[in-house]
Image: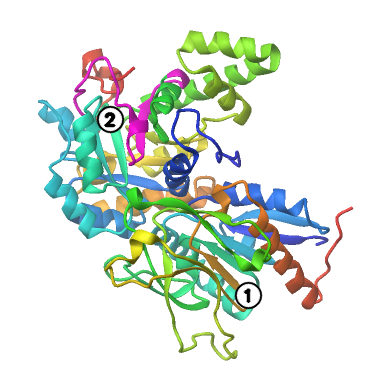
Amino acid sequence: MAANLNGASANGVSDDAWTVKAGLAQMLKGGVIMDVTTAEQARIAEEAGACAVMALERIPSDIRKLGGVARMSNPEMIKEIQAAVTIPVMAKARIGHIVECQILEALGVDYVDESEVLTPADDAFHVRKADFKVPFVCGCRNLGEALRRITEGAAMIRTKGEAGTGDVVEAVKHIRTVNADIAKAKAALATGGDLAIAALAREIGCDAALLKRTAELGRLPVVNFAAGGVATPADAALMMHLGCDGVFVGSGIFKDAETPEHAAKRARAIVKAVANYTDASALIEASIEHGTAMHGISNAGLKPEEKMSGRGW
Amino acid sequence: MPSLTVGVLALQGGVGEHTGLLRKAAAHLAAKFDFTEVRTTEQLARCDALIIPGGESTTMAIVARRLGLLEPLREFVKVDGKPVWGTCAGLVMLAEEASAAKQGGQELVGGLDVRVLRNRYGTQIQSFVADIQLPFLGEAEKPFRGVFIRAPVVEEIITHSTMGQKTAEPVEVMGVFRKAEAVKGDGGSVEDIVAVRQRNVFGTSFHPELTDDIRIHVWWLKQVLDTARHKGLPVVSAV
């Protein structure tokens, strides 16, 4: 995708600040961002070629299993991870939890993920991300949700899959929905111009100027990674094939790994699959190297209240 | 092969940003170029010049190693002496040495007799945009909007040459940046070297590809053309 994402933001962030926030995400493209819960796991991820790590207290599959309230990680653990690696360190905050975001910013994390994988702290408002110097990534299930997050200041988007399941179906559904919505916006602009864009913006609940820019670019106006349910090299390559700029892998690396070496192999295999997602022979090698995948939970068996991707709006 | 082929290394990072700006820059030059993404040795072999983009240098090095591209890249830079430009992570890849690298160090392509300091200004919160004067663009030119994202700088020009049998040419400092708050008591140099050239290898700490300013891309493509003419390669004029 050669679309030029450079240029002015549509969310009140100054041009320079926006260039720097969105620019880091542009530099992560074609890469894999891995969930890690310890400095040792972060080192495994870095050695495997991860382009960033996401620090969190428990991997999503364990959050799912253990239940309870999932919150921002302990700052001490985040500091240990920052000290252990040289690649960017991201960390998750609860939806709407301004203070968790302030703590993460003060810790010097490179990106904050305002994430539905944690238990939401506010059922009415997401964080106003434009107010922060640290850039934010947020999840979406459709174009309207993505553009609402960007209007709030998010400089990177990830399409929500169902985290912690190892089932890629929700991630596929949501990137397909985003792609279909963008096609609709392009058609609206082509046939009805600004008026049609305004009508569509009302329908999907987003800023009309940002929707127009999306239609002109033919893609989201920020970098978009896949996230949630990606368990194998083939899953990761599938998400790239569907137009994602890169992939978050949560539980898929460390869940049910027999040894740290096995986790390292899985991590290397997924990096290879993303870098070579159009090369069948590389995908064969990566799939062999990956070994057994996490056991997983079928998304079809989850009750609506058990789904994380439905959190946020 | 009627036109010059310029590749952008596409292992990870800001690839499309460079190809987009290269296309715009080429429209201002009286020559024909092909721009292509490079992921394999075969694709690299077709290139007359190469950009190593921004991204994560550790990731690029690991992926390049696993794809068997590190040695061909070194040959491209050091033996063939073809024009190469690295931005940010690309500058790190083209340095002979890197400090603040990951535990155990990181593999580099090399070509510039410099030691870079990774993440010179700190984490993402310290990333910034600042005007820099680049004399090579012309004395009367307005400053360039330098986008520094977790940027490396050239910490030191190293004197021993690692350029094999060839006589080493000096490292030219092509741009410096003086950051007010970076001066105080951090032991670093007052002026940071943010653009360097040595023979066929050019590197910048910042990301011209994250701006709409084509001046550096135009300048670099002119160097590519000069090299091609010097080597007697056919250069086809754009009609």
Q: Nearer the viewer, residue B202 or A30?
A: B202
Protein image colouring: rainbow
Label 2 crowding class (10 Å Cα cut-off): few <14, some 14-19, many 20+? many
Image mark 2: chain:
A
Picture mark count: 2
Question: Is residue A197 at least partly visible in the picture?
Answer: yes
* Proximity of marks 2 and 1: CB atoms separated by less than 8 Å: no
Q: Is residue B172 above or below residue A45?
A: below
Instruction: Look at the numbered disc 1 and give the secondary structure of its residue.
Output: loop
Place of residue B158 in the rendered image (x, y in percent of width and height, measured from the top left)? 44, 83
B74 in magenta: no
Mark number, residue B200: 1
Write the residue at 77% across / 50% down: B27
Write the residue at 24% across / 35% down: A101
Q: Mark 2 points at which residue?
A: A115
Q: In which quarter of the image is the C terminus of chain A?
A: top left
- Residue stretch rendered in magenta on the structure: A118-144
Q: Write down the quadrant of residue A119 in the picture.
A: top left
